[in-house]
Image (cartoon, coloured by chain):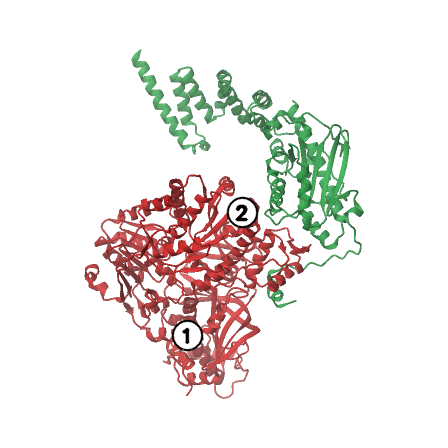
């Protein structure tokens, strides 16, 4: 295409892996509907909005017909106008009108509040109250907002914690509640979304109590199941508006893949450095560029590298939370007016804030979801001019996957969002909150929860003395405030507080605390390294000490599974797959210290921590004995001879003597031929023979057990590689957070099947239905895993496919390919 | 136990062992009173105004104007007061806390009437709230202990919840917790009503009949389960003592405010209460008496000097400032400098005070950054004035 050369020099051009062009598109315009009064139409026309885009008209029509609507058109397609017009109209008709707005970020909340304030002051004759009610709202302001806000900007957490349990303070507000606007609704998925759906149930219940029946207006990034998802979230019908009538200029979508610098290890040049190089190039050409990167730290790094590389460093600015709000407003303003040329931002600028259209959006590494990528790309584009959207791929698996499957970003939309409002743990908590808010009248509903299920829960609450029944009503019966017991963003387990010098520096949820902050662990927080001095389990406190270390720690845990109830099973190629309720028991048994960068193992430590049980749902599949035998036959592993060092012989004698010449696995005694000495952790994973040959790592085994151990290890390394793949791709296909599921590879599953295989389960106690979705997708997941490994350019495994060699063994790549083949091949 | 229950066991509380009480004793079996509605039981007591409550007399008195001003109702008299105290199912706040006992007390011509409305089932809380609202038919001023932030908002929440059309929060409130905290600041370890009773009113409760406040929510839940009102008898007793103590406590505070004999109180705080409510004469006499006993009471000197300044009695004020600068009180330098500059036009002396203020080596004051700035300005201005004065002569 023309102009391409103009933009990039050849050293950049040669690494462009994907280049797609979306043609410019004209606006599809409609008149303002005639049922709006002329004043309102004139007002917007004076603002330069002569006509509406077709989707805006469609949305406004639906809203005027009292339908719930979800608007899922592109970024910058004027979605907010869809609700601004009906709400302004309603406020003019009835100044008592109240509306709630839920925005995902504080910046967006501010932005929308300012807009409405302007509309109201210019257009409405009566004064209306507009207030932001969140954790930062000072208490004297809170009182005023409760009394007088027509338009309330808040967030789900605040609704849950502060507003609903105190709804009587908002009685007037709820009596007149007409609209609930939820912006960027796609972010409410997985555990967070399942909580949120229950907050909505509570909100609707309280609104109903005050005689209100508010209408929902949602906006969303494109999802393939937007209707199903929205319906499940608000438990009502919803009209989907997805035909985008807004214009767009020509758009170039580019995926840039940094060149491989170490083929053996599959290491590519750092995405960050390449991002800086491209950004500098763009800067010289005077284009306006927005660079996205994921962490605060990387923002600062890119900013400093880039400033060093360009002439006028002051034209490059960073943008992230943690900057002063006034500074951020300033940057937004200057960027909008073109006074700043390049801004490097976290996803803080991804959503809705008006910074105008840009020439180029440059993303440093896949941001973790397609929706996010699209939102970020959506920032590029101004009418009549081509714009560029560039994703700089990192070595991560999903980045490399997208290089090979760019259609996921540019064409179809595979992403689906799932929630399960009826997860028992989530539901129980919210029923407690709902009961606290207002007694349950007999036959009263809670969202779409079946009556008999609701009754069952209420009965449980009574059994445990948390509820009291009298006069056909059920009352909260405890001296506590249940909303405080749970945060919407966690699994519901408790949280540990991280303290350093008796100051709180952060929190970690209970499930992760044992893993990440066990005694003597090196914990990394905002780029600083800390040493854990104490894990105080009863008081849920982690004591840290700031310390620079040249190593990191990795917990070694053992996970056991126990079958509670099998729900489904089916034979698959090469084995069998299962779905059911399981108990997962994690015990963190020890940890290893590994050197930064080289990953060399410096030592081990033992830990005695209590086991943690989680009852949840899982999907697991086992590989048949037959396949294992075939895999072993093929000797797929890297079988080169190790040099065990000159002292090997004397060491083996010491070990055998220590073990009393007895096989430590089957107990057989050594006869004529000396038994083997086996490395528990494979020799190859150590930097030196001396470290590998420590007594602790050695064990006496008879030849037969030794073969089994080796075989198991290699199969295990293949399975570990497969687990690595599943862990990375599964969240992508079911649009959940990486931490919402867990994937284990195991020698012996023990959940009604003794074979080796993978166990994938919901991390939320009680599950939110993710593992069942994955169970249904078994072959798809395998196929996608297969294409990733097969297409990867590394030699024997890398972070872009089966995981780093150091983690999963050198043979993993071939092993994984072979395992998948056996699990996909048709039996002839 | 069903499946869900088994699954959720880990997050549910321990199942309590139900206390089985064979005897079904309702409140009317134990306490004298009458049902005003099906489930609201009224216990009414009348006390002659010379009744001795734990050694303190229940008597009528003239309410000190300071208290009335503090409450914003200057024309009220003692018969307009409504002493209130509620017993509830918890301190958590929000709509899940129920009120089950509302005690109110008021003076008539010659009696103190104490009415306690007890709710025998949560399901009828609305009737309880309606009874309370009926008692509010006149212009009343609440007298409560922490009622401003607890009892009254809670009653209001309940009233809204049941759709009652009454504005419970629209009445004045003499919150004795707030006042006690100031009058006895630094004199008490804590400001619970019981601690005040013990240490200020010299009274103590009869142990076996009372119940600690923290045990009340659980006791009520137990009563609902067991229908045995034995412990509720204690709660009613507890509530009655609370209200009677409120009347005695208000009387005590009232007499302290009237008296000139202030023992065991934080006199400085009392002075400030008078000052804040614009009772200047009284405030002056209190601060003076503090300084008489303790000539170096710097806070009192400061407050008193500013009252004099406000009354434009700068001679008296400056005497105090001269006292204060002996203790290197920063503000006093500045006030003296102002006085010398603007009133006495004595620029040289004003300059000296200003310089002394700037040299004051007390680091405590360094944070007042703009004060230092202002002082530097003042210094410059004074130097200019001195300069032009010497030029013109």
Q: Quick check: can you spot residue A690? A: no
In front of the other: A216 or A546: A216
Same chain shared by disc 1 and disc 2: yes
Pointers 1 and 2 in contact (CB under 8 A)?
no
**Which circle marks residue A175 in the picture?**
2
Q: Quick check: can you spot residue A345? A: yes
Residue shown at 55%/52% (left/top)?
A208
Residue A205 picture location, percent across and down: 56, 54
Residue B136 picture location, percent across and down: 66, 36
Chain A: its colour in the image is: red
Q: Secondary structure at mark 1?
A: helix
Q: Is residue A489 left or right of residue B35?
A: left
In terms of image quadrants, where is residue A827? bottom left
Q: Secondary structure at mark 2?
A: helix
Q: Where the C terminus of chain B falls, by quadrant?
A: top left
Q: Where the N terminus of chain B falls, by quadrant?
A: bottom right
In front of the other: A124 or A445: A124
Name the subunit of mark 1. Answer: A
Furthest-front residue in view? A34
Chain B: its colour in the image is: green
Furthest-top residue in view? B393
Q: Is residue A165 left or right of residue A75?
A: right
User: How many labels were placed on the picture?
Assistant: 2
Earlier-in-chain disc, 1 versus 2: 2
Name the subunit of mark 2. Answer: A
**Which circle marks residue A278 in the picture?**
none
The residue indicated by pointer 1 is A780
In front of the other: A583 or A268: A583
Residue A293 picture location, percent across and down: 34, 57
């Amino acid at each position: 295409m023309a102009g391409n050369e103009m933009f990039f020099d050849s050293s950049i051009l040669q690494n462009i892996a994907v280049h797609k062009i979306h043609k410019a598109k004209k606006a599809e315009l409609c008149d303002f509907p005639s049922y709006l009064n002329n004043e309102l139409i004139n007002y917007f026309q004076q603002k330069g909005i002569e006509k509406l885009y077709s989707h805006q008209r469609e949305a406004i029509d639906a809203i005027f017909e009292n339908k719930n609507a979800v608007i899922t058109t592109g970024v910058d397609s004027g979605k907010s106008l869809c609700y601004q017009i009906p709400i302004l109209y309603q406020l003019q008709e009835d100044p008592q009108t109240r509306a709630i707005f839920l925005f995902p970020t504080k910046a967006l909340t501010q932005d929308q509040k300012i807009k409405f304030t302007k509309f109201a002051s210019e257009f409405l004759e009566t004064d209306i109250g507009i207030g932001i009610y969140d954790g930062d709202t000072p208490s004297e302001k809170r009182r005023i907002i409760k009394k007088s806000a027509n338009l309330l900007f808040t967030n789900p957490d605040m609704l849950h914690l502060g507003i609903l349990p105190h709804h009587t303070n908002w009685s007037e507000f709820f009596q007149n509640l007409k609209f609930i606007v939820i912006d960027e609704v796609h972010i409410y998925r997985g555990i967070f979304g399942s909580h949120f759906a229950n907050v909505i149930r509570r909100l609707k219940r309280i609104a109903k109590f005050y005689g209100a029946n508010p209408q929902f207006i949602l906006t969303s990034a494109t999802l393939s199941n937007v209707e199903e998802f929205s319906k499940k979230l608000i438990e009502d019908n919803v009209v989907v508006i997805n035909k985008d009538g807004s214009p767009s200029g020509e758009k170039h979508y580019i995926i840039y893949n940094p060149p491989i610098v170490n083929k053996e290890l599959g290491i590519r040049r750092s995405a960050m450095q390449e991002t800086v190089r491209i950004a500098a190039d763009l800067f010289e050409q005077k284009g306006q560029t927005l660079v996205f990167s994921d962490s605060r730290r990387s923002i600062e790094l890119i900013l400093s590298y880039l400033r060093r590389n360009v002439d006028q460093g002051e034209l490059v600015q960073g943008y992230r939370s943690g900057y002063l709000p006034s500074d951020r407003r300033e940057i937004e303003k200057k960027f909008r007016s073109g006074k700043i040329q390049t801004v490097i931002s976290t996803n803080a600028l991804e959503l809705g804030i008006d910074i105008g259209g840009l020439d180029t959006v440059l993303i440093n590494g896949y941001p973790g979801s397609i929706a996010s990528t699209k939102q970020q790309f959506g920032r590029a584009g101004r009418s009549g001019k081509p714009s560029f959207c560039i994703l700089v791929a990192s070595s991560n698996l999903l980045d490399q996957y997208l290089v090979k499957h760019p259609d996921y970003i540019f064409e179809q939309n595979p992403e689906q969002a799932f929630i399960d409002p009826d997860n028992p743990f989530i539901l129980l908590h919210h029923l407690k909150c709902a009961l606290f808010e207002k007694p349950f009248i007999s036959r009263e509903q809670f969202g779409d929860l079946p009556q008999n299920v609701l009754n069952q829960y209420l009965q449980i609450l009574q059994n445990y003395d948390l509820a009291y029944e009298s006069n056909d009503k059920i009352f909260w019966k405890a001296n506590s405030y249940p909303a405080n017991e749970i945060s919407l963003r966690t699994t519901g387990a408790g949280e540990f507080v991280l303290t350093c010098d008796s100051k709180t520096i952060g929190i970690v949820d209970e499930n992760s605390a044992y893993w990440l902050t066990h005694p003597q662990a090196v914990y990394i927080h905002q780029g600083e390294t800390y040493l854990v001095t104490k894990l105080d389990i009863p008081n849920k406190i982690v004591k840290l000490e700031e310390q620079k270390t040249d190593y990191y720690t990795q917990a070694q845990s053992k996970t056991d599974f126990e079958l509670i109830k099998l729900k489904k099973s089916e034979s698959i190629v090469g084995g069998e797959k299962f779905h059911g309720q399981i108990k997962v028991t994690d015990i963190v048994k020890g940890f290893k210290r590994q050197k930064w960068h080289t990953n060399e193992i410096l030592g081990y430590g033992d830990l005695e921590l209590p086991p943690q049980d989680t009852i949840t749902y899982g999907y697991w599949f086992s590989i048949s004995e037959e396949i294992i035998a075939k895999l072993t036959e093929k000797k797929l592993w890297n079988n080169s001879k190790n040099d065990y060092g000159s002292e090997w012989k004397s060491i083996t004698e010491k070990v055998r003597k220590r073990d009393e010449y007895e096989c430590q696995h089957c107990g057989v005694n050594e006869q004529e031929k000396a038994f083997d000495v086996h490395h528990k952790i494979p020799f190859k994973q150590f930097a030196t023979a001396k470290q590998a040959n420590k007594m602790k790592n050695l064990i006496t085994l008879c030849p037969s057990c030794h073969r089994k151990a080796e075989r198991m290890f290699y199969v295990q390394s293949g399975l570990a590689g497969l687990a690595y793949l599943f862990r990375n791709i599964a969240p992508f296909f079911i649009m959940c957070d990486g931490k919402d599921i867990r994937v284990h590879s195991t020698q012996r599953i023990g959940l009604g099947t003794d074979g080796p295989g993978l166990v994938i389960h919901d991390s939320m106690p009680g599950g939110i239905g993710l593992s069942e979705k994955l169970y249904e997708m078994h072959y798809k997941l395998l196929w996608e895993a297969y294409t990733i490994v097969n297409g990867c350019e590394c030699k024997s495994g890398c972070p872009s496919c089966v995981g780093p060699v150091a983690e999963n063994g050198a043979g993993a790549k071939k092993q994984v390919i072979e395992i998948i083949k056996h699990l996909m091949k048709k039996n002839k | 136990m069903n499946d869900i229950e088994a699954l959720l066991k880990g997050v549910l509380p321990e199942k309590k062992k139900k206390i089985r009480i064979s005897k079904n004793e309702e409140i009317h079996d134990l306490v004298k009173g009458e049902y005003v509605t099906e489930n609201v039981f009224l216990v009414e007591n009348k006390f002659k105004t010379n009744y001795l409550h734990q050694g303190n007399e229940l008597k009528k008195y003239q309410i000190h104007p300071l208290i009335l001003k503090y409450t914003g109702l200057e024309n009220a008299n003692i018969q307009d007061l409504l002493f209130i105290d509620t017993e509830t199912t918890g301190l958590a706040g929000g709509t899940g806390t129920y009120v089950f006992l509302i005690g109110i007390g008021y003076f008539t011509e010659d009696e103190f009437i104490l009415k306690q409305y007890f709710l025998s089932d949560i399901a009828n809380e609305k009737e309880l709230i309606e009874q309370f609202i009926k008692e509010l038919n006149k212009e009343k001023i609440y007298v409560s202990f922490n009622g401003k932030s607890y009892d009254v908002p809670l009653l209001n929440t309940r009233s809204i919840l049941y759709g009652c059309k009454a504005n419970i929060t629209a009445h004045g409130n003499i919150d004795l917790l707030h006042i006690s905290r100031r009058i006895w600041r630094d004199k008490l370890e804590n400001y619970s009503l019981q601690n005040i009773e013990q240490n200020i009113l010299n009274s103590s409760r009869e142990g076996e009949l009372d119940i600690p406040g923290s045990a009340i929510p659980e006791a009520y839940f137990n009563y609902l389960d067991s229908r045995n009102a034995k412990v509720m008898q204690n709660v009613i007793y507890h509530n009655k003592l609370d209200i009677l103590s409120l009347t005695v406590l208000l009387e005590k505070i009232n007499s302290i405010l009237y008296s000139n004999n202030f023992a065991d109180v934080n006199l400085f705080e009392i002075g400030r209460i008078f000052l804040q409510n614009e009772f200047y004469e009284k405030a002056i006499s209190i601060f003076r008496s503090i300084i008489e006993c303790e000539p170096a009471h710097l806070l009192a000197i400061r407050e008193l000097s500013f009252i004099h300044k406000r009354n434009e009695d700068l001679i008296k004020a400056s005497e105090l400032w001269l006292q204060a600068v002996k203790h290197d009180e920063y503000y006093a330098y500045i006030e003296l400098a102002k006085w010398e500059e603007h009133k006495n036009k004595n620029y040289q002396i004003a300059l000296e005070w200003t310089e002394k203020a700037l040299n004051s080596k007390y680091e405590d004051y360094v944070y007042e950054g703009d004060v230092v700035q202002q002082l530097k300005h003042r210094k410059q201005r004074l130097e200019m004035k001195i300069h032009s004065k010497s030029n013109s002569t």
